[in-house]
Image: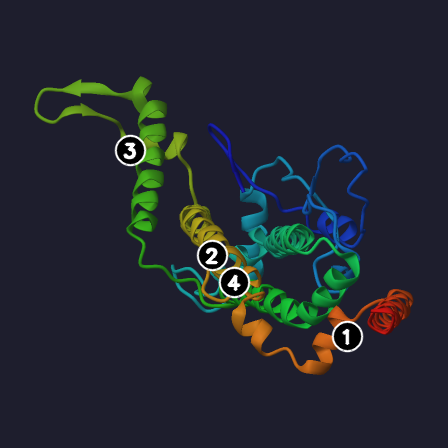
Amino acid sequence: MKNGSNQQRYSVDDEGLKAMDVAAIDLDDHDPKGTIKVRQVRDHLELEDLVHAPRILPEPRGGSIHGWLKGVYRDARGFELGTLNSTLLAVTMKRQSMKWKSLALGYIADIVTMAHTFVIDLLRVVCPVERVRTGIMSLLTGHLMEKYKAAISHVNFLLEIELDGTPATLNHYFNDNLEKWDGSRQRRMHARMESKMFSDCKHGEVVRLEDIMQNYPMSNADHAIQDLHDILHSYYKVARKRFVDSLRMQAADYHLTTGPSTPLTLFSLAFVADITSRQLEEVAREDLTLKRRRIQLEKENKDLEDGKKILS
């Protein structure tokens, strides 16, 4: 959704989105012109079946939204008399936010991948023995996947609320934005009528009614479409900011980085205490070759000690 100086410009490229969103890409590839990568971080092999695959989306396409809104309004007309169909905001909002899912899942996939990379790097520092480190990681993997799935599930929950729920807000900026659009329309109309104004001693500056009708001919349908545009634009701004904040604070921060039960808190004293003797043996067991060599050296050392006692 984009703003022009005098016209409102939005992305309504359904076919382009459907065609490009199904194609996975390599992150090393250059962005095709007019596209956006939803992923920036390369996946670990064990995460490929869990997180959103790298994809490309078309950038917002320039063009006036009024033609599209007119078609939506015409298709949705029913028995309403002089009022907007109550479902129009939900329908148009869902169309305008159709790229949110790929962008949001791509974002959380990058955060999941970075959190997983941090866990791997941390284990490499605290446990330099690769065999032991691999064993510990095998014990952590199941718990890590549960944490990652919880974060992704929360993103889908937020998407369901925003895209499939009833549009609603208590944010006062929605009304503020509506008032700004109304004021902007009045200023543009005043600028067009300025050349038609003349001074009247009794009433100040006035404009003849026929001049207004000639310069601002809007039908009832045009007024309804303009109202729909203003409501959609005002609500979209509020909903977008709300969704982005929720995505960052709830899914990324709470579930993956700063919350009380993130992947970074798994390797703790409680986790170590819950490791069974069998698991510990599998993780910390000696290499068989080294074990045989150690047993041989211990036997030789004992034999030397026994010989020393006999000679003394």
Is there CB contact under 8 Å for labels 3 and 4? no
Residue drawn at (54%, 49%) of the image: 69
Mark 4 or mark 1, which has the lower sequence index?
A: 4
Is there CB contact under 8 Å for labels 1 and 2? no
Between the C-alphas of marks 3 and 1, the distance is 90 Å
Q: Name the foreground residue: 213 vs 35.
A: 35
Within 10 Å of the Cα at label 3, are there few (<14), some (14-19), or many (20+) other Cα atoms? Answer: few
Between the C-alphas of marks 1 and 2, the distance is 32 Å
Is there CB contact under 8 Å for labels 4 and 1? no
Between the C-alphas of marks 4 and 1, the distance is 30 Å
Within 10 Å of the Cα at label 1, are there few (<14), some (14-19), or many (20+) other Cα atoms? Answer: few
Q: Amino acid at mark 2?
A: Thr
Depth-wise, is mark 2 or mark 4 nearer the camera? 2
- Number of the label disc, if any, that sits on residue 258: 2
Q: Secondary structure at mark 1?
A: helix
> Where residue 215 sits: x, y (%)?
40, 30
Q: Secondary structure at mark 2?
A: loop
Depth-wise, is mark 3 or mark 1 nearer the camera? 1
The residue carrying mark 3 is 209
Mark 3 or mark 4, which has the lower sequence index?
A: 3
The residue carrying mark 1 is 282
Scheme of colours in the image: rainbow
> Where residue 113 sits: x, y (%)?
67, 53
Is residue 270 something that shows in the picture? yes
The residue carrying mark 4 is 255
